[in-house]
Amino acid sequence: MTHAIEDLIQTGSIHRSVYTDPAIFDLEMERIFNTTWVYIGHAQEIPEPGDYKTTLIGKHPIIVSRLADGSVTALINRCRHRGPIVCQHERGNSKHFRCPYHSWTYDNSGKLIGVPMPQGYGASFDREALGLVKVPRVAEYQGFIFGCMTAVGPTLEDHLGGITRFLDAYVQTSPTGKIELFEGTQKCGYNGNWKYQLENGVDPYHVGALHLSAVTPEAMQIYRQGRGCVIAMDGHGVTDHTDWGPMPVDASLSGGFNLVIFPNLIVLRSQIRTVRPIAVNRTEIHTNVVKLQNVPDEVNLRRIRDQEFEFGAAGTFFTDDLEIFERTQEGLQSGAVEWLVFSRGLDREEMKNGYMTGTMSDETQHRGMYENWKQMMMGPKTPALAAE
């Protein structure tokens, strides 16, 4: 890393190494993903006792499990004996997890309940101290489950800040005030930095160019009118289209909002998208499609069909996005130009309702997220997990 962190984010510009330097990526895993609240799943993915899913917090493999009392825990998915991943499945229902290497077995709360030939370890062997390590804090808001690798620090509500009013409105799109998920997860990857997807999730400016072939003339007319706004909100990003209308029940392009909840959650009209950083130049995206309760079947059918058309494996929007992420990573390998321009709207943004706000084509929301990124990256070293 050749530049100090505080020098990488300037007013209206970002240094290319933020996306290309492996040392910066490693520091992101330590200073961001090891310290803040990270989205790890939705309550509807593990509705019943014994249900679990596996995921990641940065570089940590995680099991998110619903216990018999209905509570949710998150465990480091790594055997305490010799270190293999314990649970290989993406989701399922089980009261226990068994390591395939030597059959050390844990219940779904993480307690070590089985060790073959335990006498070989002698009288000092303490199985109570050798359970799966727990993610120090797990909390839920409106069904969205987050984990934090530090035992102390801001609460989840503090981390979310003003974005909670948008999450409240999102679930209220459902007549019952609760959302469900269609079965299955759409997974894809691209050869580029993870932050491209965060920027893109709240970037209306690109729609009229990158997605021109897929956007209707009516939607483009609204876009060109400049209605709506972008908001830098407590380190997160918002594109607020509610002056077109509330979040549409059928997920059409007729209002609502897009959210990026830093560092890894994107909430769009019909989907919950999880960003998984794998390497400085490799990212995975896992997408769940949202189903509403107590609406006609044809409404939910429209939601999933629109999702497939726009963001499916051959979707009209998503294929454009993934290709441009890879082109960007390729272009930034050149050091002939060191800085990227993030100054759009800088001279016209203003404080509204306590948050810096710009017009719909501005980059105010991106500048807010990168200021948050810089502050986290300049923070203290991650405390060690309490599992000695």
Image (cartoon, rainbow, N blue to C red):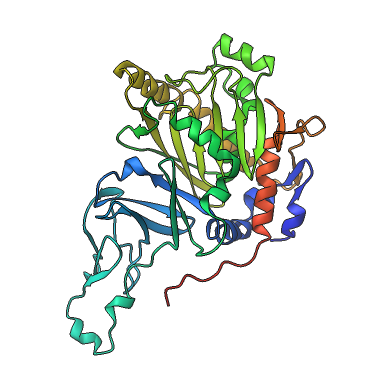
Residue found at x 59% / y 44% = 161
Residue 79 horizontal/vertical position (percent)? 32, 68
Quadrant of residue 2 within the rendered picture: bottom right
Q: Nearer the viewer, residue 302 or 50?
A: 50
Question: In which quadrant is the C terminus drawn?
Answer: bottom left
Q: Nearer the viewer, residue 280 or 97?
A: 97
Against 222, is 148 above or below? below
| Residue 323 visible within the image | no
Q: Position of residue 254 (x, y in %)?
A: 53, 17
Q: Is residue 296 above or below residue 51?
A: above
The quadrant the N terminus occupies is bottom right
205 to the left or right of 273: right
Relative to the observer, which residue lies in front, 258 or 273? 258
Q: In the rendered view, tell whether residue 217 sits above or below residue 387.
A: above
**Residue at 70% over, 38% down:** 354
**Residue ID at (60%, 33%):** 202
Residue at the spot 52% in from the left edge and 51% down from the top edge: 156
In the image, 43 versus 274, the foreground residue is 43
